Image (cartoon, grey):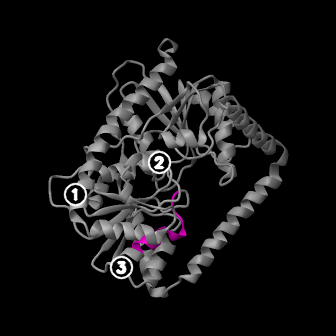
Amino acid sequence: MQEERVQTCLQRQQLEEDLEQYMGFGKALRYACVYRLAALQLRAQQFSHRFFSAERRYIQAQQRLERANYKPYQLELMPPAVSQRKRVVHAIASFAVGGSQQLIVDIIEGSSDLYEHQFILYNDYEWKYSAGVPITELAYMRHTEEALALFRELKPDIVHVHYWGNRVNGYEHWRWYHQIFEAAFAYGAHVTENCNNPIAPCLHEKIERYAYVSRYAQDYSGIPSPNNRVVYSGSNFSVFTRPEEPMPKDCIGMVYRLDRDKLNVESIDVFIKVIQRRPQTKALIVGKGYYDELYRQKVADAGLADKIEFTGVIPYRELPEYYRRMSVFVAPVHKESFGQVTPFAMNMRIPVAAYEVGALREILVSDDVFAPAGDSDALADTIVRLLDQPARLMELGQFNRERAQRLFSLEAMVQAYREMYAELLDPAKTN
């Protein structure tokens, strides 16, 4: 069965590569049309929830203020421990806010004594999540030779690809990632691939390690291989902690990039329904993205603008202040391969209520915090029940903290990646 699965995955990948070669411009045009239709659909949804122009102008003014005040996180690098550090080049589509981006930041900060790090990005967005490491934008490559020329300039010992080559949702990203792989192979660097999302990885005999952020991610999309590693995304619990103080009452919240990769149009509904059933409760929506305006519209239409606070993008070091205001963290996601925001909450003794999707069962385990995927009424019931049981909230919070400390620490994750890099550079250490 395992051999058949491997062959099936390889055949699927070969078919995709054949399509890439023979369909060319026509396919790219079709994908552009798909994106345009998706954009029109969102506009239609926004129109159906539209509200008065004065309130819209107020929201736009707040968003401009957030953009002006936001400061990216400055990486804190260790002094070199060796005279000549090996160089790691990270390849990722964008370096905006997200779990994959935070994972890279943590790897860099935890290994900068032995390794010099740089980035190659597809999109160098105006809002950078972090600063302090050289970044090169390399978008819309027409030929793999462009990436190969860059590798010859950067001279990486390791190319660490953080893969999001979902061909269905992003043709250009899929092509970009595969060009990066081809150039890394041609250059001759060691190549490792992080699989942080529940999509099929890029498979190649020259990829020496596959790192999955959960057993779910490995089982969902990977294939059996001695090169597989499950490395949970570690969290900096010295930042995401709280003193022994009374927990807040009647405040629920979430911390996500408000985009389609994890959330959908209905994700905001559970917050609206909880407050409609429990008027003393308030909510925090921390983050920004594709659905930001639509969520605000739906909240305004429900008459709950004074109950649900949208914070916009919050700098990493300031996030714990917002977690400390929460009685229950909510994960209303439709897809989740790990979700670092959940261990952040866990270590701060915050119960987490979630849809039972992806790796969340693996992370949280407690039966009474889950609702069926996409059932906002059931998730609202779960949250209301927890809020009405203060003793259970305290019990769950303590359980979460102990579990997070045991399984999801930053130190354990960094050590795993340091060992992985050492194995790549020294074949004698390879198992």
Write down the quadrant of residue 28 in the picture: bottom right
The relative height of residue 99 versus residue 377 in the rendered view (above or below) is: above
Q: Nearer the viewer, residue 365 or 236?
A: 365
Q: Position of residue 186 (x, y in %)?
A: 68, 26
The three-letter amino acid code for the residue at tag 2 is Ala
**Span shown in magenta:** 262-272
State how far apart marks 3 and 1 are (Cα).
22 Å
The secondary structure making up most of the magenta span is: helix
Q: Nearer the viewer, residue 125 or 32?
A: 32
For residue 336, say whether it is visible: yes
Residue count near mark 1 (Cα–Cα under 10 Å), binned few <14, some 14–19, many ≥20:
some
Find numbered disc 2 in the image and state the secondary structure of the residue it sits on: loop
The three-letter amino acid code for the residue at tag 1 is Met
Residue at x 29% of width, y 75% of height: 281
Residue count near mark 2 (Cα–Cα under 10 Å), binned few <14, some 14–19, many ≥20:
many
For the residues labelled 3 and 1, say whether their Cβ atoms are less than 8 Å apart.
Answer: no
Q: Is 418 a magenta residue?
A: no
Looking at the image, residue 415 sits to the left or right of residue 431; the answer is left
Q: Nearer the viewer, residue 229 or 205?
A: 229
Q: Which of the two discs, 3 and 1, labels the residue nearer the N terminus?
A: 3
Residue count near mark 3 (Cα–Cα under 10 Å), binned few <14, some 14–19, many ≥20:
few
Q: Which mark is residue 277?
A: 3
Q: Which mark is residue 359?
A: 2
Q: Which of the two discs, 2 and 1, labels the residue nearer the N terminus?
A: 2
Residue at x 37% of width, y 40% of height: 234
Looking at the image, residue 303 sits to the left or right of residue 147; the answer is left
Q: Position of residue 403 (x, y in %)?
A: 30, 43
Q: Which mark is residue 394?
A: 1
Most distant residue in the right direction: 22
State how far apart marks 2 and 3 are (Cα).
29 Å
Find numbered disc 1 in the image and state the secondary structure of the residue it sits on: helix
